[in-house]
Image (cartoon, helix red, strand yellow):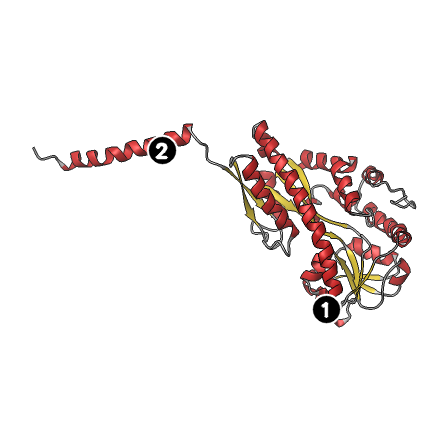
Amino acid sequence: MRPTASCSLKALTQPVTIALATILLGTAFGAQAATTVNLSYNGAPDPDKNAVHVFATNLQELVAEKTDGEIEIKLYPNSMLGEEQERMEQTMTSPSLNIASFAGLSPVVPEVFVSAIPFLFDDFGAARNFFDQGAYWQAVKDDLNGRAGLELLAVVEEGGFLAFTNNKTPIAEPADFDGLRFRAMDPSQVALYEAFGASGTPIPWTEVYMALKTGVADGQMNPPMYIILGSLYEVQDYLTLANIQYSDQFLVGNASMLNGWDSETQAAFREAVAEANQMAREHNQAQVDERIAFLEDQGMEVIRPTAKQLDAFREQGQPAYLDWLADQNIEQSYIDMALEDAGVEMGVSASE
């Protein structure tokens, strides 16, 4: 008897159905699919130009390794998922990670500006201890979690310490600023320049090179990485390594997501974060030295102020910034904690 079309179709599809069921059962009861977590951040996916990208790629590899592939980090550089505020909102409302700058973090915890008090740290070690062990930073972390449901997982270095540059005169102490005009990034920088007898004018980063070239401004401040990135060495003659501010960004994660993982996965993830951050710190510090050498090779004169000169910068610059913090209605307790963690009393050197 010749089989009907329906019998033939049933005979043909039965092995496929059995195979599909086997695959589905294997997925359900066997190896679980990886959980994909988005990580967004600023800047190009270029390790030579973006220290944050170095951290992100290290984290991606380490998380996959330490969780045996259970957690997969997907990278979104160049603000692909939105600008600062958009990315923070996404992290608050979805299971994701974000590396935020001050612009992203400060609307939720304006107290973060206290960590940018100028001349607070003598070197990388002092800055890292401040964030890794300080009571002030723990208070900021607690506030962020309580206010936004976000966990602050790491402070990510983005290029070393800010340095002064200008094209008029070597700057080794505050008196050398007299009469100079500087590009400022925000009002706090204007206050700092004015404390030294200079003037500050807010100028967007995209206009800084031309402003320096045409004399609209005589100088600016940025880490060596950004000085090279903007080719500012072409229009600036002097580089002053005054350790003005520690240049950093902040890895934040959705707390509900993290708390939803089992304890073993959480421990592996946090271990990966710590290890990636240590690797990024080592890379960054080595790159800073190389970048300073590059700027010297390009003809910039590098000024390294003495301890006494750095104290003079600190003693004039910090009060101006603290006045600015008061205008932002930052509670004094945060400032007191930060100064204590950094080993600073007003009028007393951090190195004493």
The residues tagged by marks 1 and 2 sit, at their Cα atoms, a distance apart of 62 Å
Q: Determine which residue is flagged by label 1.
A: 234
Q: Which mark is residue 49?
A: none
x, y percent for residue 210: 71, 69
Rendered location of residue 139, percent (x, y): 75, 35
- Quarter of the image for the N terminus: give it: top left
Residues 79 and 221: in front is 221
- Residue 50 in the image, given as x and y percentages of width and height: 64, 54
Local SS, label 2? helix
Give the total number of marks visible in the rendering.
2
Q: Is residue 94 visible?
A: no
Q: Position of residue 333 (x, y in %)?
A: 83, 37
In-front residue for pair 199/316 = 316
Q: Amino acid at mark 1?
A: Glu
Query: Relative to 188, is 151 on the left or the right?
Result: left
Q: In the figure, residue 226 lies in which quadrant?
A: bottom right
What residue is disc 2 on? 23
Determine whether the residue tagged by mark 1 lies in a helix, strand or loop: helix
Residue at the (62%, 51%) spot, across then down: 42
Mark 1 neighbour class, 10 Å CA radius: few under 14, some 14 to 19, many 20 or more: some
Q: Amino acid at mark 2?
A: Ile
Q: Quadrant of the C terminus?
A: top right
Q: Residue furthest left?
A: 1
Q: Residue 261 vs residue 214: left or right? A: left
Q: Residues within 10 Å of mark 2 (few under 14, many from 20)?
A: few
Residue 209 visible somewhere in the drawing: yes
